[in-house]
Structure formats: C-alpha cells, structure tokens
Image (cartoon, helix red, strand yellow):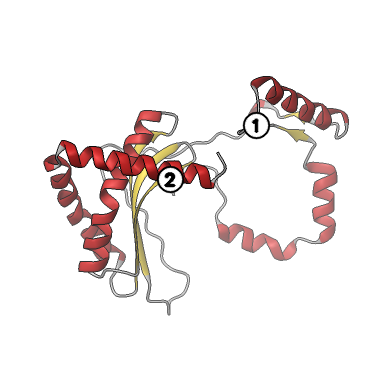
Amino acid sequence: ALEAKRWHMDCYIQVLPSIGLGDLSSFISDTLFHRTWTEMFLTGNVTLESSLDIAEDLEERLTEEKSALPLLPSQQTECRVVKVPAGQATVYVKPGTDANNDNSAVMVCFQVGPDSDLQSNALCELLVHVAKRDAFYQLRTVEQLGYLTWCFQHSTATVKSMCFLIQSSAHSAGYLESRISAFLPVLLEKLTTMTEEEFEKHKEQLGVRMHWIMLHAGM
C-alpha cells in the first residue's frame, strides 16, 4: 500500500493463464531489448577503471548486437513511496481471500526516512536490534499473540522503516495492532533508562551481526 506503481501478485495470477511460449519468445526478441536503461552494481576485487570498462562493454553489446535504444525520460522508472503524515496513523485494511481461513495479520511500520541517509539507516538497524528480543518475548512468549512475531527493519523502494509483524489464528488484526501499540511505551522506557554500558554492548553486537551478514553475502 505504501509503494506507487507496483503490481500486486493477484495481477500476475490473472494474466499468467493467457501467456504462451510464443508470447515469451516474442517478448525476448522484439520487446526486451528494444529500449533499455542499465544500472550496474559491482562489488569485490574490482577497480573503478575495470568497472567502467565492464559497463561500457555491456552498453556496446546492447546497442550493437541488440540494436537497443535508450529509454525515453517518461519511460524511466520512478521509485516513489507514499509518505505517512508525521504524528498520524494511516491504516490500510485488506480482507482475506479465503473466508474459511481464521488467520489474521498486522504489519505496523514507522517510516524512518530515505535509505540514502547512512546515519538514519544505522540508527534504524540499532533500534530494531534493541527492540526485537523484548518484542518477541512480550508479544509472542508472554501474550502468545501469534506464531509469527517479528520486529525488523524494512526498505520499501527508497524508504527505510521499522516494522512489527504478527500473524495469529486467535486474535483479530485490530487487537494485534493494539498490543503492538501497548508495547511501544515499554520500549521507550527501556531506551530512556539504558546505561551507557548497555548501549555500547548493543552497538558491538549489531556490528558483529552485520559483519557476519556481509561475510555470508561474500562482500
């Protein structure tokens, strides 16, 4: 609901039955490379000069071998996200497609800001790291709201958010949201009473976690 110009999964499901092999072949040969916009990200043991050479080689192949033309300005993708007004709650409700399914789910997001801001990204990651253990303990272990109970950071197109997600077969989405709201003052109390030693420990733990994530990703 926060993203502009995004296809819902239901749209793909509706279209797929009418697509044949000929449609796919025609798309590849006539449409895919007709007009292109190339963005590249290179990481690892590569220099700036070699990266530029790779990008130039790719562009030459697209233009010379595929006769690709650049996208018109109006065709270029514009990543936009709906900005939730500060200090206001914005609610998006969608009924389930199966009336016999007794599951409910709620996702509560607090927009932090553009993910191009490195400091805001780091602060969001740190806040989630501090909150997620207590959130799981209170909402899952103590209150037993649902078998899926997460606190995590999430990027929606170009915007970073702190999110809570609960899925439950025992409670309504409205009740789940109310329990997340009740947890927030508990989290605030923890943040305001945290000692400097505890804060530094959280920073160290997050740094170690991010280090292992980067190693696992081969970065």
Instruction: Please provide percent x and percent y for residue 216.
Output: 52, 47
Instruction: Please provide percent x and percent y for residue 159.
Output: 43, 37
Please report whichever mark, 2 or 1, sits nearer to the chain's N-terminal start.
2
Residue 64, image quadrant? top right
* Mark 2 neighbour class, 10 Å CA radius: few under 14, some 14 to 19, many 20 or more: few
Q: Please give the label number shown on residue 2.
A: 2
Instruction: Please provide percent x and percent y for residue 178.
Output: 22, 59
**Residue extending furthest right?**
65
Residue 95, image quadrant? bottom left
Looking at the image, is 218 positioned above or below residue 20? above
CB-based contact (under 8 Å), mark 2 and mark 1 = no
Looking at the image, is 3 positioned above or below residue 101? above
* Disc 2 residue type (three-letter): Leu
Q: Say which quadrant the C terminus sits in.
A: top right
Q: Please give the label number shown on residue 39.
A: 1
* Disc 1 residue type (three-letter): Glu
Q: Is residue 3 visible?
A: no
**Residue extending furthest top?**
49
Instruction: Please provide percent x and percent y for residue 107.
Output: 35, 56
> Looking at the image, which residue is at 21% across and 54% down?
181
Q: CA distance from mark 2 to mark 1?
A: 24 Å
> Looking at the image, which residue is at 79% across and 27% down?
57
> Looking at the image, which residue is at 43% across and 80% down?
100
Element at label 1 = loop
